[in-house]
């Protein structure tokens, strides 16, 4: 069975989750990671609008209009959940209390810089909480498709405005897992059925390719 | 604290006023006050809030009714109307990282001269700002924000104006409550004094100026 790109990305990132940690998921693909938490593992998911303990989307009649995710959609809360104001929420984020954040991306460059909040002249949604998350989370993982309209999103140098000068730890696409040890893009894993050559060909950035590159264990 | 009607509360807000509005994508936004601002046709308002929600929801109502001259927010991406008016030059938009926005508001309300944050260092956000090094790390000096009015949505208000908020509808509300000259509250339920235990009060009554009566 072939998996769609978003599922591959979300399932692979779920393997980065560690029991008992505080994890913040951005909107779009990152949200899907919550669907693949390994059985028996307890994760504290934070929603930046003021919730730790975000649970699954409730059935329609059970939605509580004052219990929502960062996109304003109804969510549920798991036992042990807590709510707080935005100053506390960003104290958690900026203060280094978030163990891992998963964010979407427009570009990641070969040093590990992320651009994900605006395309000048075209799309200016605003940075929301992204700049604080990249600045303050212990570990930053980017979830994005490898290319957009045939062009690599993993570039030599970001041409879009940066989200932070702090570099990310990992980018996961439907083709590959890339890490940034020593500030250099390094191919760590390829997706099932994808060759190293295919990843390199789809990537504008110069990739370091170690002698062994594992296949994603989905 | 005085109780008031929604019409009278909003009539106190002149054209050109600055408003801090609670809510996150409309959740925790005082919708009755948004509707009345629109109905009274206010113009040239400055809104300081997390976002502009979506058209027809929360602050999105003010955007669509062209009540706004300026928006200071962290995110406008889910309201195409805000982006359209920004591109057309009808509304000035200042984008501020969310953690910085809430701290600039908190600084204003807590009597601080600003806050230092590493968020935005080395990005376009640092343009025109002082950089200060503390223990070898660079920070941006972010200045306090103030507003003429704070418009809050509470879950419970007692007869004195003590407030609590519910779940994720809390967000910016208790922080903006500290930072405006005049604080106007709409509450889902108004309850007798004592029904909110002292430890559960999230905003003390002394900083609330007007409580909009339930009808």
Image: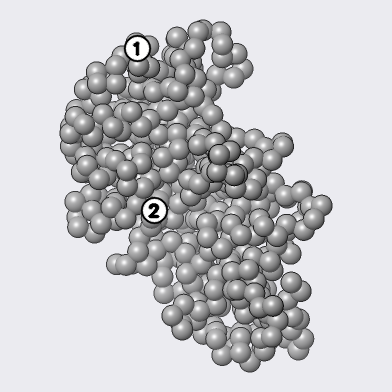
Whether residue A182 is visible, yes or no, is no
Residue A115 image offset from top left, x and y in percent? 47, 67
Residue A96 image offset from top left, x and y in percent? 64, 49
Between residue B208 and residue B96, name the one nearer to us. Answer: B208
Label 1 Cα neighbours within 10 Å, binned few <14 / some 14-19 / many ≥20: some
Q: Residue at image x 23%, y 49%?
A: B91
Q: Residue at image x 29%, y 16%?
A: B5
Left-right relation of B44 to B211: left
Residue B3 image label: 1
Q: Does label 2 lie on the same chain as label 1?
A: yes
Whether residue B149 is visible, yes or no, is yes
Look at the numbered disc 2 and give the secondary structure of its residue.
loop
Q: Quadrant of the N terminus of chain B?
A: top left
Chain under disc 2? B
Q: Could you give the CA–CA distance between mark 1 and mark 2, rounded to whole angstroms?
A: 34 Å
Q: Residue at image x 55%, y 43%?
A: A60
Residue A149 image offset from top left, x and y in percent? 43, 80
Q: Is residue A217 above or below residue B205?
A: below
Residue A14 image label: none
Q: How many marks?
A: 2
Q: Is residue A125 above or below residue B180?
A: below
Q: Earlier in the sequence, mark 1 or mark 2?
A: 1
Residue A21 image offset from top left, x and y in percent? 73, 50
Residue that badge 2 annotates: B78
Q: Is residue A192 above or below residue B128?
A: below
């Amino acid at each position: 069975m072939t998996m769609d790109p978003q599922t591959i990305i979300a399932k692979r990132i779920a393997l980065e989750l560690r029991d008992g940690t505080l994890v913040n998921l951005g909107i779009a693909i990152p949200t899907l990671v919550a669907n693949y938490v390994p059985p028996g593992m307890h994760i504290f998911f934070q929603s930046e609008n003021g919730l730790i303990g975000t649970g699954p989307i409730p059935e329609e009649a059970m939605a509580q209009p004052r219990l929502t995710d960062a996109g304003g959609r109804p969510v549920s809360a798991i036992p042990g959940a807590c709510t707080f104001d935005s100053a506390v929420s960003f104290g958690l984020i900026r203060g280094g209390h978030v163990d891992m954040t998963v964010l979407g991306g427009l570009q990641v460059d070969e040093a590990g810089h992320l651009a994900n909040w605006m395309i000048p002249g075209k799309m200016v949604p605003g940075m929301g909480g992204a700049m604080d998350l990249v600045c303050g989370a212990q570990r930053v993982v980017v979830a994005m498709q490898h290319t957009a309209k045939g062009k690599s999103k993993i570039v030599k140098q970001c041409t879009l405005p940066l989200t932070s000068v702090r570099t990310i730890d990992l980018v996961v696409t439907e083709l590959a897992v890339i890490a940034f040890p020593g500030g250099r893009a390094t191919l760590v894993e390829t997706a099932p059925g994808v060759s190293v050559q295919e990843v390199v060909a789809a990537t504008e950035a110069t990739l370091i390719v170690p002698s062994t590159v594992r296949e994603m264990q989905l | 604290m005085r109780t008031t009607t929604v019409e009278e509360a909003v009539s106190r807000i002149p054209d050109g006023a600055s408003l801090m509005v609670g809510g996150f994508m409309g959740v925790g936004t005082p919708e009755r006050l948004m509707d009345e601002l629109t109905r009274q046709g206010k113009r040239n308002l400055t809104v300081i809030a997390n976002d502009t929600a979506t058209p027809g929801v929360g602050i999105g109502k003010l955007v669509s009714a062209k009540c706004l001259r300026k928006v200071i927010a962290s995110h406008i991406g889910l309201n195409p109307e805000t982006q359209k008016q920004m591109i057309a030059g009808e509304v000035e938009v200042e984008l501020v990282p969310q953690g910085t926005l809430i701290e600039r508001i908190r600084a204003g309300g807590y009597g601080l001269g600003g806050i230092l944050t590493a968020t935005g260092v080395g990005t376009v956000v640092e343009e025109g700002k002082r950089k200060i090094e503390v223990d070898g790390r660079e920070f941006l000096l972010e200045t306090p924000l103030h507003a003429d009015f704070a418009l809050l949505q509470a879950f419970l208000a007692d007869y004195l104006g003590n407030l609590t908020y519910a779940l994720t509808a809390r967000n910016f509300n208790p922080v903006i409550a500290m930072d405006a000259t005049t604080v106007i509250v709409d509450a889902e339920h108004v309850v007798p004094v004592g029904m909110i235990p002292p430890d559960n009060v999230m905003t003390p009554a002394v900083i609330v100026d007007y409580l909009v009566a339930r009808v």
